[in-house]
Image: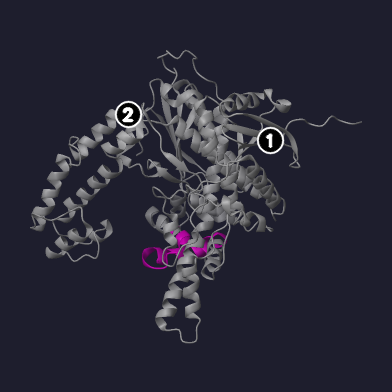
Amino acid sequence: MSTAPDPSPAACVLGRIEGTRVAVVDLDRAGSVLHRIDLAEAALPEFVRARESGRGQGGNPPRWVLSDTPKWYPPLLAAGVRIERCHDLRLAHAILMRSQLVTEPEDIRAAKEWEAGPASAPEPDAAVALFEVTEGRGHIKQVPHDIDSALAEFARQAAAQGSASDPGRLRLLLAAESAGGLVAAEMQAAGVPWDVDEHDRILTEILGSRPHRDSKPAKMLAVAEEVRTALGDPRANLDSHVRLLAALRNAGINVASTSKWELETSEHPAIEPLLRYKKQARLLSANGWHWLDEWVSGGRYRPVYVPGGVVTGRWAASGGGALQIPRQLRPALRADQGWRLISADVAQLEPRALAAMSGDRAMAEAGRGRDLYSGLVDEGIVATRQEAKIAVLGAMYGSTTGEAGALVPRLRSSFPAAMHLVDTAAEVGAAGGVVSTWLGRTSPVPGEGWTRLQKAANQFDATPADENRARRAAGDQGRFTRNFVVQGTAAEWALAWLADLRLRLAGLPAVDEDPGATSAGGPGIGSGPVFSRRAHLVFFLHDEVIVHAPAEHAEAAAQAIREAAAAAGRLLFGDAPVDFPLDLAISERAVKD
């Protein structure tokens, strides 16, 4: 008995051809071409809509192969078209070219035109900087968008996956990373509901009324005068690091820098108002009225997310500062009338990921159904929750001195499997090796500067200073790889959470179709054509999500968040006895305690 071949494509590759025309190439599971359709770029949204609605080949929505999601997806969303699945060639290339699971990476690495991933390995004394998620760290390099280049790269990536030592894990990572690319584009398109009046009220309360152009608000000026009076220097320049440091020293405040931690070591009366001024200055420059004018319009704040913008897989931002919204501005995140914001974050995500990936049942039990730090206290490992937090963070970041250095040995005896995993990762990094996350994202090799230091220390005429520099660089690299495996695996769990939640939210019903509706649950017009009538993600930060949902669907959206978190744990870690409890709230404003 013979069966007819399945006509539905395994993948649909998008790419440009000449001028304003694009091509869609359907591939079967073996990568062979089934069909090629050339069409005008303006016709692409309706073509994709038809495929997504099941009117395409085989009746099922396809997996779209995109050279770069931010290039292709925003115009579709603007036209009211949402896609269910994709494979992002740029994001996948960054993973495959480095992953230890890829046993034959030569072809992938040779395709230099596709290298647009996160920064390379740290230079000596700079490893920790790779864990900082700051504005502008995202990659912006363009990759090829023509159809021939896309087809060739997709074939290379398929071959790399086929030769992988654990293709299942790698496929899961690439699917999650690509889903993250879709989520990032969708969140930018929908925007965060933003109360401009509330934002202005908060700024006025903290800084004073909005000043004229290039001036400082009144309350800031008043605090500056407090500082100058306390210093006995009416001309002290508080906005210049060099001049402020000189003014502090002239007043007898012997500090090496103007950082908060350094200033807090002094009891001089100028310190308290100076710290207040620095907070005001940071708020004004990062999220003041100029930020409000630039990034908020139509009642929506639309930052630019960069999935995979940090080498561990964490997201970065290349515009809008979504990863650095100060706590005092949270009240400005306000749901539309008749809608709610559902905020959820995971308690101690990274330690839980460490417990799961290491198989440390004792550590898993310490956090099962409860706050993990409190669990360590209940188990008698440490005396207070604060000590527990210091000990766990010290273990993951390799702290060997101070309070953390004294507490970490207790974890080593209580959680041997978890500590063995991070200790081994640190040893590999200190020796110049690379490590991988649970799904196969691999750390970058040490930079040239690191290698030079190690070589210099091994020369016959090496000085004690050479040896100390090499030892310090090796320690930094070890701390980097120690945390890489934990932070990267936690980022993978978060991606799986996002991907699953995105699909669950899409399955919730839409609200009233009448665009003029104003009753509870009416359309949220500011969210755009795809998301104005249904629950959708609007914010993500490492271990936290915020969903904007019609009031009548808020409880269903909250349940979707919980179920997606549980599903992400099962997907990555199977039946490991680790749970990922959520702190969840439904409200009109996203205010955190």
Pointers 1 and 2 in contact (CB under 8 A)? no
Image: 266 above or below 24: below
Q: Answer whether residue 404 is magenta in the image.
A: yes
- Name the one closer to the observer, 207 or 19: 19
Q: Answer whether residue 211 is magenta in the image.
A: no
To which residue does mark 1 refer? 25
**Quadrant (top left/top right/bottom left/bottom right) for the C terminus:** top left
* Residue 152 pos. (x, y %): 67, 46
The numbered mark at residue 529 is none
Looking at the image, residue 176 sits to the left or right of residue 319; the answer is right
Image: 29 above or below 481: above
Callout 2 crowding tier (Cα within 10 Å): few <14, some 14–19, many ≥20:
many
Question: What residue is drawn where x is 45% and y is 70%?
Answer: 473
Question: Reading the chain from its start, which is encountered first: label 1 or label 2?
Answer: 1
Instruction: Note whether residue 565 is visible.
Output: no
* Residue 509 pos. (x, y %): 55, 21
Predominant SS along the magenta part? helix
Q: Amino acid at mark 1?
A: Val
To which residue does mark 2 refer? 195
Disc 1 from disc 2: Cα separation: 44 Å
Q: Of helix, strand and loop, which one carries label 1?
A: strand
Q: Amino acid at mark 2?
A: Asp
| Residue 250 placement: quadrant | bottom left
Question: Which residue ends up furthest to the bottom in the rendered image?
Answer: 461
**Quadrant (top left/top right/bottom left/bottom right) for the N terminus:** top right
Callout 1 crowding tier (Cα within 10 Å): few <14, some 14–19, many ≥20:
many
Q: Of helix, strand and loop, which one carries label 2?
A: loop
Looking at the image, residue 220 sits to the left or right of residue 587; the answer is left
* Residue 36 pos. (x, y %): 70, 33
Question: What residue is drawn where x is 66% and y is 55%?
Answer: 107
* Residue 544 pos. (x, y %): 45, 41
Magenta highlight range = 393-418
